[in-house]
Each structure stands twice: as C-alpha cells, then as structure tokens.
Amino acid sequence: MAVFYERRPESLYVGIICDHPFPCHVHDVVEIICLLTGAVEMTVGGQRIRLAPGDAAMVFPSIPHSYDMVSEDASGLTMIFTTDVIAEYTRTFRTMRPASPLLTAAEMPEELPMVIRRLAAISPEEDSPYRLAWLHLFVAYALNAADLQPVDKSMLTGMTSQVLHYVSSHFTEPLSLESTARVLGISRIHLSHIFSQQLHINFRQYVNSLRIDLACNLLRDPENSISQVAWKCGYGNLRTFHRAFLSQLGMPPNQYRRRFLGDAAPEEQEEDELSSGTDESDDAWEE
C-alpha cells in the first residue's frame, strides 16, 4: 500500500486519538499522540513502535506513519498542528528529527502528565485560550526530552509533502520521474532520493500502488469495463495494467472483479491495447 498525502483542514486540533488502524500517510503538520489507556502500535518513518499507557509518539512533518493496531480500550490525546502555530519551534520541526518517535513514560519530564491532563480536559469544540498555552508548554518539555538530530539538507520536509501532493493529484496522468522532477523544479536524483530514503519505495512502485488502489474501486462497478478502468487509472495499454495489477494483488483484474461481483461480473472481451492510448513501455518509467 502506498503512502498517501493527507491534507489537514485545521491549523490546530487537540482531541481523542484515532480509535482504529489507519494506513500509511503523510501530511505537512506535526502529530503527537499521548496514550492514556490501552495499547497502540504504529510505524513512523519505518520504525515500528508500541505505545503503552503514559507513552507519547511524535510525528514531525512529512514523515510517513500508520496506526497498525489500536486496542479496544485505547484512549488518549492527539495533538495536530501546523509548524507555525508555535513559531519559535518552526525551524526545529522543519530541520530536525527525533532519533526515536517514541517518548516513553519513563523518559517524560515529570511535568508532562499534568500538561496532558490539562489539554485532555479542554473540549475540542471549546474555544479556550488555554489550549495553545498548554500545547506550547507540552512541546517545550517534549522537545527538550527528545534526542533530536538534524535532517539531511537534501531531504528537507516541505519538498516531500509537495512531491506526494503532486503525485497524488496527477497519478492518473502520464508520469515519469523526469517529468515530475521538472514540474517540481528539482533534480531527478533528488526526487529519487526522496522516494528511496524517506518513503522506502521507488517512484514506479509508488505510482503503480496509487493506480491499482483506484483500479480496485473502479472494478467493483460493473459499468466499468476493464479497458476503461485501465485508461482511467493512467495506463496506456492493458498489458502494462495487467502486469502491475498482478504484481500488486497476485491475481489479474478479471479474477479480482469476479471475487467481488460474482455472477454480476460482466463478460467482456478485453482488447490488448486501449484504443485511445499508446504503448507504455517499461522504458517510460524511471526508478
């Protein structure tokens, strides 16, 4: 499953934690999770962590992360905010990273549990002037306790968000590493580095993952022929579509369709090439 770009509508949110697993995503805001009861397992920037009561996880901007397991009795606090909400730490959030995203209860300054309780007592709907003040205090203590390390200058966070947002918006169009780098005003090597070092997936795999996710949804509608699905997902011919689909799901598109539609799956004779497309050879892709 590819990382997807999540655009957050608010500049500041303090509320309950996610109560269910959530796939790998990235956004251009800070996300901090403080667990009060239960257990949560997350993957943050490729590191698998398990939160116990009293622990916190810090996710800096543009770091891919997922909620892999959330226990039924899990409760806690989530703080999501843009880096400019607390201006004095904007540069820190943009240029530094915690060596570990997990801040255990034993590592927390003794003042933090009280700050968390104060924040949790403020309703998300309440327009309280104290919310930002308590958040500021939490960030000050948490960052002081964290082992922060500088980010590689070639991987500064804002560009990763721009890359993922652009690809997520244009993956159904003809895309290559070269054309995407040109649009974003960076080198092909820099773009490849972002995918391999930050997202742990190459450009071709990432685009294919987005396209096949869309294809799975479209195939569940019997009104869409397999050729139409391939075209809508950005593939120039059926051979490339079938190869990508089989590689990701382990079955061809028509078998996937029958799995969900059964007898309602339409009988269709698939053409080898899309009438409105051109042959998309592997040479069109760059890793």
Image (tube, rainbow, N blue to C red):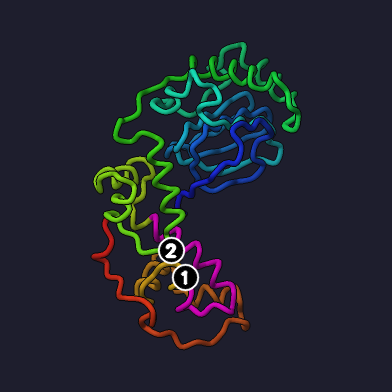
Q: Distance between the residues labelled 1 and 2?
A: 7 Å
Q: How crowded is mark 1: few (under 14 residues within 10 Å), some or many (20 or more)?
A: some
Q: Is mark 2 on a helix, strand or loop?
A: loop
Q: Residue at x 61, y 16 (%)?
A: 112
Residue 224 higher or lower than 207, as above or below: below
Check the image and name the residue furthest to the top: 110
Q: Which residue is drawn at 67% across and 27% down?
A: 36
Q: Which quadrant of the structure image shows residue 139?
A: top right
Q: Which of 76 and 151 is in front in this view?
A: 151
The stretch drawn in magenta includes residue 122:
no
Q: Which quadrant of the structure image shows residue 57?
A: top right
The number of numbered discs placed on residues in the rendered structure image is 2
Left or right placement of residue 250 versus residue 7 in this view: left
Question: Is residue 254 at least partly visible in the picture?
Answer: yes
Q: Which quadrant of the structure image shows residue 105?
A: top right
Q: Which of 268 and 189 is in front in this view?
A: 189
In x, y percent, where is residue 79? 61, 30
The stretch drawn in magenta includes residue 211:
yes
Left or right placement of residue 169 versus residue 52 in this view: left
The disc at residue 232 is: 1
Instruction: Tell whether label 2 touches label 1 (CB within 8 Å).
Output: yes
Which residues, given as a range, are shown in magenta?
206-229
In x, y percent, where is residue 174? 35, 64
Amino acid on which disc 1 is placed: Lys
The disc at residue 278 is: none
Q: Residue at x 46, y 41 (%)?
A: 64
Q: How crowded is mark 2: few (under 14 residues within 10 Å), some or many (20 or more)?
A: some
Q: Mark 2 points at which residue?
A: 172
